[in-house]
Image (cartoon, rainbow, N blue to C red):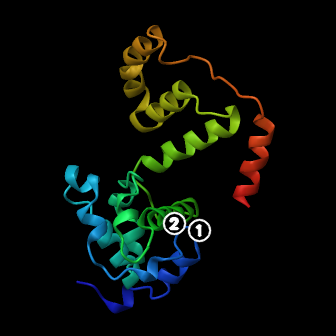
Amino acid sequence: MIKSTDLDPDFKYEISKEPGGENIKKCFNCTGCTVGCPVTEIDKSYNPRMILRKAILGMRKEVLSDESLWLCASCYICYERCPQDVKITEVIGAIRAIAQREAKAGKIKLDNPKPLFDHLFIDSVRKNGKWYEAGVSGTFMLRTKGIGGAIGYAPMGFELWKKGKLNILPHTIKGKDELKRICKEVEK
């Protein structure tokens, strides 16, 4: 049961102020985003329309802690099918950003490993100019599966390395300092 006292009527405005969330209030719940979504073919519980609907209704806690929020593959099919130009993929990104800030502040707990992977990936790009696959994957496995889980993936990593598909050491690019400057500007 939903109680009106549990709703945050300003949540949609908070999302609309977030980069990418500007068009959330245009959504009239037509289902076009969900009907065309390839993730719904794999996971029937994923429903981007419901995420947006709950957000518009002010169901802040439910939206920010919803595991399905992290299932969006960013394929932009929903973006193309939306008659209102809501830009659902970007709205989902805006909601994720709010969820990550709330988790960092200790207000909510995120159990999904995707934010961790995203963080490791972005840090790797910041440091090296491109992602360091072995480092990101190894750290991710260690932090999500523990030492035993990480060791369990070592044979696959070794096979990829033997085939030249995985580098043990990170590669760097020219212009790393410029990339770091750009990242700092974007984060402001």
Q: Quadrant of residue 160?
A: top left
Question: Which residue is pictured at 51% across the width and 66% down the height?
Answer: 94
Q: Which residue is mark 1?
A: 19
**Count of numbered marks:** 2
Image side of residue 112 versus residue 95, left or right? left
Quadrant where the image shows the N terminus: bottom left
Q: Left or right: where does residue 124 sit relative to residue 143?
A: right
Residue 76 at what x, y percent from top left? 40, 57
Residue 124 horizontal/vertical position (percent):
62, 36
* Furthest residue in direction bottom, as rendered: 4
Looking at the image, do the residues carrying marks 2 and 1 touch, with CB atoms under 8 Å apart? yes
**Quadrant of residue 173 within the rendered picture:** top right
Task: Give the left or right position of residue 102, taking residue 157 as reference.
Answer: right
The single residue placed furthest to the top in the displayed view is: 162
Within 10 angstroms of label 2, few (less than 14), some, or many (20 or more) residues?
Answer: many
Residue in the image at 76% along x and 35% along y: 176
Residue placed at 51% from the left, 75% from the top?
15
Please give the label number shown on residue 94.
Answer: 2
